[in-house]
Image: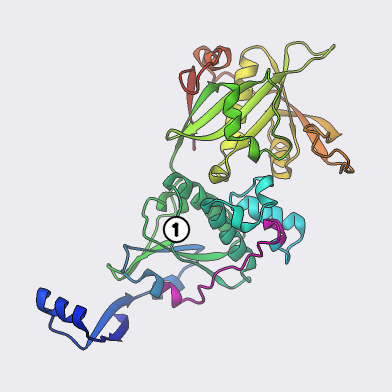
């Protein structure tokens, strides 16, 4: 087996002499590390994602360097994040950031140094993935080491979907094994084992179990800075909080829709998924579930979409009837004194089947929420 050996001549002093005497160390001239390297098998099959895993000091970074350069991205903190992706068109940049699970419009407009750790890590991923040439292997060290473990799962899922869709190749080094079921790597390599292991092609992402609560209006404070139109919310809105492993991840609000022709109609007013949990499909799945609840309760539910990816998804979903396009409005008053750019808003009515909704699930609609979590709740599972 081939090895990488790293040697270093020891400069002796009182501290090293103490170690020799206290721990009976015999070699006082040099220290060395041997790391087995055995990646030949990955050249015999097609792959998109590889992971080098192991604890600290096992040689992950050394092995990763065998594949190329590990240099960091250089973001200009005088520019908005999205402006750093200037080798792409603006539209391409928004799709790349969204694909990495960084789809919060306010985040795009902030400089890199004002982002959270999780947002910065996703931005780094987007930059390296987007910059990679067609035949280049993307190399990422210390993958998810600085983020919450549920955030790591969301990040891993968003990354693997994009890499496979674009038919790119990436190798990640990580000391965390909990991301494997979300990354679904084609192969893994442990320096301790010294061999490459191929993964089954039949694996599936784990189930995500979410809790949906009626919540107080004040819950909006956790989410309002991430809404791309306005931080304002109508005081009469019916609010819903979504949690995952007791962490707030998303917020939805609905309002009655006054109309002289459509009775008992409601519309979606706000939907926000926190940046750390974007890329898992939470927003679409939960909004559709809530739309089902409203229809099951005998109400007509309308929703307007501006985000291109969301619009395309609803246009392809037979559970939504497309009612047409209309121009965007300055709902939050933020554009006062500025020319309003005409953005197409796509209007839909939810018309899907609701036979899978049980009567008791409607309690989450009817409960008069007066506390953060001491309220009616439903639990749903996402695959």
Which x, y percent locates residue 236?
68, 17
Q: Is residue 327 left or right of residue 380?
A: right
Magenta residue check for 75: yes
Q: How is the image coloured?
A: rainbow
- SS category of the residue bearing label 1: loop
Magenta stretch bounds: 63-83
Q: What secondary structure is the stretch in magenta mostly built from?
A: loop
Q: Residue at x 30, y 85 (%)?
A: 8
Q: Is residue 165 visible?
A: no
- Residue 191 can be seen in this image: yes
In the rendered image, the residue lying farthest to the front is: 14
Q: Residue at x 88, y 43 (%)?
A: 338
| Residue 124 found in image quarter | bottom right
Seen at 45% across and 46% down, the residue is: 204
Q: Residues within 10 Å of mark 1 (few under 14, many from 20)?
A: many
Instruction: Examine the rendered structure and indicate whether residue 305 appears above or below residue 149.
Output: above
Instruction: Return the x and y of residue 113 as percentages of the image width and height.
Output: 60, 57
Residue in front for this viewpoint, 334 or 49: 334
Q: 81 or 319, which is in the foreground?
A: 81
Residue closest to the eye, 322 or 128? 128
- Name the residue beneath numbered marker 1: 185
Percent x, y of residue 241: 55, 27
- Residue 137, position as x, y percentages in the image: 54, 71
| Residue nearest the viewer, comparing 258 with 225 | 225
Q: Is residue 38 magenta?
A: no
In the image, taking residue 111 as reference, residue 63 lies left or right, namely left
- If the image is split into quadrants, where does the N terminus sit? bottom left
The reply, left or right, for residue 257 in relation to residue 247 is right
Residue 268's quadrant in the figure? top right
Total numbered labels placed on residues in the image: 1
Task: Judge whether 11 appears above or below 89 on screen.
Answer: below
């Amino acid at each position: 087996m081939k090895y990488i050996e790293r040697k270093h001549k020891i400069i002796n002093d009182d501290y090293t002499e103490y170690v020799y005497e206290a721990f009976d160390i015999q070699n006082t001239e040099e220290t060395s590390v041997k790391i087995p390297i055995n990646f030949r098998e990955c050249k015999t099959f097609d792959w998109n994602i590889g992971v080098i895993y192991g604890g600290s000091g096992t040689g992950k970074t050394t092995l990763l360097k065998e594949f190329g350069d590990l240099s960091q991205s250089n973001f200009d903190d005088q520019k908005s994040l999205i402006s750093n992706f200037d080798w792409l068109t603006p539209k391409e940049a928004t799709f790349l950031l969204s694909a990495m699970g960084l789809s919060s419009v306010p985040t795009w407009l902030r400089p890199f140094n004002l982002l959270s750790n999780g947002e910065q890590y996703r931005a780094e991923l987007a930059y390296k993935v987007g910059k990679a040439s067609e035949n280049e292997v993307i190399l990422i060290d210390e993958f998810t080491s600085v983020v919450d473990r549920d955030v790591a799962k969301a990040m891993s899922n968003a990354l693997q979907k994009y890499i496979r869709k674009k038919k790119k190749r990436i190798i990640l080094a990580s000391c965390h094994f909990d991301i494997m079921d979300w990354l679904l790597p084609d192969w893994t390599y442990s320096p301790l084992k010294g061999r490459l292991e191929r993964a089954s092609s039949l694996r599936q992402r784990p189930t995500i179990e979410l809790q949906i609560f009626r919540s107080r209006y004040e819950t909006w404070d956790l989410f309002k800075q991430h809404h791309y139109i306005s931080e304002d919310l109508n005081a009469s809105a019916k609010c819903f909080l979504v949690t995952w492993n007791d962490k707030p991840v998303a917020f939805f609000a609905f309002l009655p829709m006054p109309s002289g022709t459509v009775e008992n109609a409601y519309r979606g007013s706000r939907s926000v998924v926190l940046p750390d949990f974007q890329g898992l499909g939470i927003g679409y799945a939960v909004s559709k579930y809530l739309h089902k609840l409203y229809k099951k309760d005998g109400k007509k539910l309308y929703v307007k979409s501006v985000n291109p990816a969301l619009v395309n998804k609803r246009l392809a979903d037979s559970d939504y009837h497309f009612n047409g396009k209309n121009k965007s409005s300055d709902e939050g008053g933020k554009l006062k004194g500025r020319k309003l750019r005409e953005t197409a808003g796509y209007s839909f009515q939810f018309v899907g089947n609701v036979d899978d909704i049980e009567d008791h699930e409607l309690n989450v609609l009817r409960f008069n929420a007066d506390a953060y979590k001491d309220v009616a709740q439903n639990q749903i599972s996402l695959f």
